[in-house]
Image (spheres, rainbow, N blue to C red):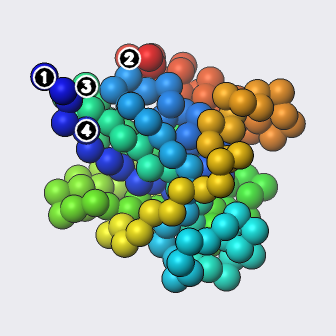
Amino acid sequence: MEPKYEKATLGGGCFWCLEAVYEEVKGVKDVVSGYAGGHVENPDYRQVCTGTTGHAEVVQITYDPSVVSYEALLDIFWNIHDPTTLNRQGADVGTQYRSVIFTHNDEQRKIAERSKEEAQKRFHAPIVTEIVPLQKFWPAEDYHQDYFRNNPHQGYCRAVVAPKVEKFKTHHKGWVK
């Protein structure tokens, strides 16, 4: 019997980082880097980088809920970025790098809100992650897809993406493919 896949859409800084981590998670079929939460139709990277479109860099994860739960995906999310920094992750600054959970339905919203409350217990500063319904997801340009896999020696990948992937593999061994 073919698995019944579901989708999760998350933003926590540069989409290359999230994509690289979630591609390593058991039960994840596909991860697509893209844009969500803005007011411009079919935005491109150049537009999103201006911070004027309202979009966040996000990943849309297609996963098998019989293997990995939405809750588990969110637990990973809270651990691979800093949800207490407003509109930034490290040196990446701007609303396009905000921490955000775009929900696909009311059940995801409820789970995300509970997950955020639980995660807050682990942080001293308030979590600023937005939880909002997904209106539209726009895939990013082809060169952004599988970026870390295709460019592991690029400077940003070595300095920023690789440490996040290693942190995931160290702290979530049970979820690594």
4 vs 1, front mark: 1
The residue located at (38%, 17%) in the rendering is 174
3 vs 1, front mark: 1
> Distance between the Cα atoms at labels 3 and 2?
11 Å
| Residue 170 image offset from top left, x and y in percent | 54, 19
Q: Rate crowding at label 2 as few (under 14), some (14 to 19) or many (20 or more) other CA atoms within 10 Å.
A: few
Q: Rate crowding at label 1 as few (under 14), some (14 to 19) or many (20 or more) other CA atoms within 10 Å.
A: few
Q: Quadrant of residue 9?
A: bottom left
| Residue 120 image offset from top left, x and y in percent | 39, 53
Is residue 92 shown to the viewer in this render? yes
Residue beneath label 4, please? 5
| Residue 129 image offset from top left, x and y in percent | 46, 63
Residue beneath label 3, please? 67
The kind of secondary structure element at disc 3 is: loop
> Distance between the Cα atoms at labels 4 and 1?
12 Å
| Side of 173 relative to 47 (left or right) | left
Amino acid marked by disc 1:
Met
The residue located at (72%, 30%) in the rendering is 150
Residue beneath label 1, please? 1
The kind of secondary structure element at disc 4 is: loop
User: Which of 130 and 35 lies nearest the eye of the viewer?
Assistant: 35
Asked whether the beta carbons under mark 4 and mark 3 sit within 8 Å of each other, the answer is no
Residue beneath label 2, please? 174
4 vs 2, front mark: 4
